[in-house]
Amino acid sequence: MTTALILLMAMVMVSMVHHVQGTSHLSFANNTEVNITRAGCGDTKLCVQTPDGCDPAASTQCLFASLNASTTMAPNGTDLSVELSGNSSGYIALGLTANASQGTTLLFICAQNNGSFFFRTMTRNNSNSMISPSETRVTEIRGSVNGDMIQCEFIIPGANATDTRSSNDTMFIVILGQGPVNGTAIGSFNETLRTDLLNVSDPSSNVAPTPTSNTTSSASTSAAHLHDVLLLLLPSVLSVSLLKTN
Ligand SMILES: *[C@@H]1O[C@H](CO)[C@@H](O)[C@H](O)[C@H]1NC(C)=O
Ligand SMILES: *[C@@H]1O[C@H](CO)[C@@H](O)[C@H](O)[C@H]1NC(C)=O
Ligand SMILES: *[C@@H]1O[C@H](CO)[C@@H](O)[C@H](O)[C@H]1NC(C)=O
Ligand SMILES: *[C@@H]1O[C@H](CO)[C@@H](O)[C@H](O)[C@H]1NC(C)=O
Ligand SMILES: *[C@@H]1O[C@H](CO)[C@@H](O)[C@H](O)[C@H]1NC(C)=O
Ligand SMILES: *[C@@H]1O[C@H](CO)[C@@H](O)[C@H](O)[C@H]1NC(C)=O
Ligand SMILES: *[C@@H]1O[C@H](CO)[C@@H](O)[C@H](O)[C@H]1NC(C)=O
Ligand SMILES: *[C@@H]1O[C@H](CO)[C@@H](O)[C@H](O)[C@H]1NC(C)=O
Ligand SMILES: *[C@@H]1O[C@H](CO)[C@@H](O)[C@H](O)[C@H]1NC(C)=O
Ligand SMILES: *[C@@H]1O[C@H](CO)[C@@H](O)[C@H](O)[C@H]1NC(C)=O
Ligand SMILES: *[C@@H]1O[C@H](CO)[C@@H](O)[C@H](O)[C@H]1NC(C)=O
Ligand SMILES: *[C@@H]1O[C@H](CO)[C@@H](O)[C@H](O)[C@H]1NC(C)=O
């Protein structure tokens, strides 16, 4: 009976802990240096950005993300290395989802509280756009804030979708956006870019076949027709946590 009581108390405590938003699922790297460039875009990393083809190292107006997948595949999933750069007095975010019109989007948020960097994970309900805290594990987080310029790097370990959906493990829709903060409270998410379904294990999967008038290097991934519908394509590597956290 005592054992049962202890067990019951333990369960209550565990469920309480579970509902309080903590940050124990996040770990930070010592090295705070963040250097985000287009080097490797389309070759060793999948790049998504708005405006089309913009360079995060050259423009403060460039909202940019890159994804690099480790070679490990299903059923163990793959580790996804992410770079994220953009201008916001609040936060910038990367979203990954399997279907933007149903289920949830996992949001990885790099934010500033009056110049101090902080990191959060949230899920967005794709049906009603409500966001709520999630406990998605993220490692090796690094971030910097310079005025309104926020840059960060992090790793999403062990993406694995084989038990939550039928589509290919490494196929994801990538979303970029930003929003306000109030202290360290995350305000509503404003989506500014959404790709088609991309294979995150292929860095060139969103590189357009036709070149544009862009003068940037061969890594440029712009495509006029995509621009028209505000869609870019990127692969992404995360799915288990997507549905796990809803
Ligand atoms: C952080 O730095 C300490 C001391 O410099 C070192 O012992 C530790 O391994 C570092 N941790 C990481 C994750 O690099
Ligand atoms: C940033 O990275 C680029 C390309 O990897 C490199 O050329 C440049 O020297 C780096 N800058 C700093 C400040 O580390
Ligand atoms: C990720 O980056 C590493 C190191 O640059 C590279 O060897 C690997 O091929 C990249 N992954 C993909 C899927 O391109
Ligand atoms: C998956 O992980 C297990 C345990 O770490 C390992 O034994 C197995 O070889 C991995 N499978 C693949 C396909 O990487
Ligand atoms: C990934 O999902 C498969 C299917 O549910 C499961 O067998 C496997 O253990 C999972 N791998 C990891 C690393 O969670
Ligand atoms: C950056 O964003 C802020 C709003 O968050 C805006 O006031 C500012 O003009 C932007 N700066 C640049 C250089 O785009
Ligand atoms: C996404 O969800 C919508 C609405 O539930 C559905 O009609 C559509 O077929 C789904 N798309 C994919 C690619 O699964
Ligand atoms: C933000 O920081 C500046 C200087 O670092 C300080 O003067 C200002 O009061 C701070 N604002 C808030 C809302 O904390
Ligand atoms: C998943 O994608 C990989 C890489 O593009 C491909 O080799 C594999 O055949 C795909 N699997 C399925 C079930 O579509
Ligand atoms: C920010 O949060 C504080 C404390 O919760 C609240 O009093 C204030 O109204 C909030 N400000 C805005 C602009 O929402
Ligand atoms: C969302 O961002 C766009 C431009 O990035 C801006 O025009 C729009 O007003 C924003 N919407 C909200 C609700 O903040
Ligand atoms: C998402 O929102 C819809 C509509 O409000 C609701 O029916 C659904 O249960 C929500 N899904 C999740 C996972 O919260």
Image (spheres, rainbow, N blue to C red):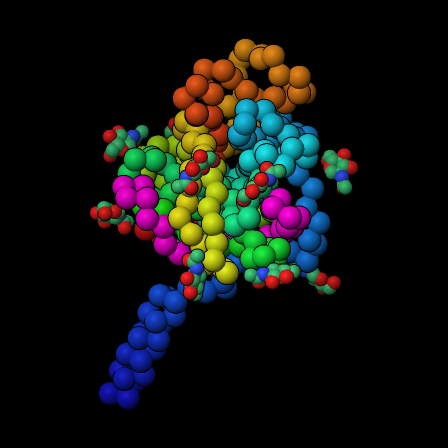
Where is residue 33? Give x, y as percent: 71, 49
Where is residue 77? Give x, y as percent: 46, 42
Residue 218 in sight: yes
* Residue located at (62% from left, 55% from top): 115
- Report the front residue among 23 and 118: 118
Indicate the quadrant where residue 207 lies: top right
Residue 159 in sight: no
As drawn, the residue found furthest toward the bottom would be 2
Residue 75 in magenta stretch? no
Left or right relative to 7: residue 177: right
- Report the front residue among 93 and 22: 93
Where is residue 156? Give x, y as percent: 52, 47
Which contiguous range is marked in magenta?
Answer: 126-151
Q: Is residue 225 above or below residue 138?
A: above
Residue 135 in magenta stretch? yes
Where is residue 140? Give x, y as percent: 60, 53
- How many marks are shown on the rendered structure? 0
* Residue located at (54% from left, 11% from top): 210
- Report the front residue among 164 and 220: 220
* Residue located at (58% from left, 57% from top): 114
* Residue located at (32% from left, 83% from top): 6
Q: Quadrant of ligand 2?
A: top right
Left or right relative to 105: residue 217: right
The quarter of the picture where the N terminus appears is bottom left
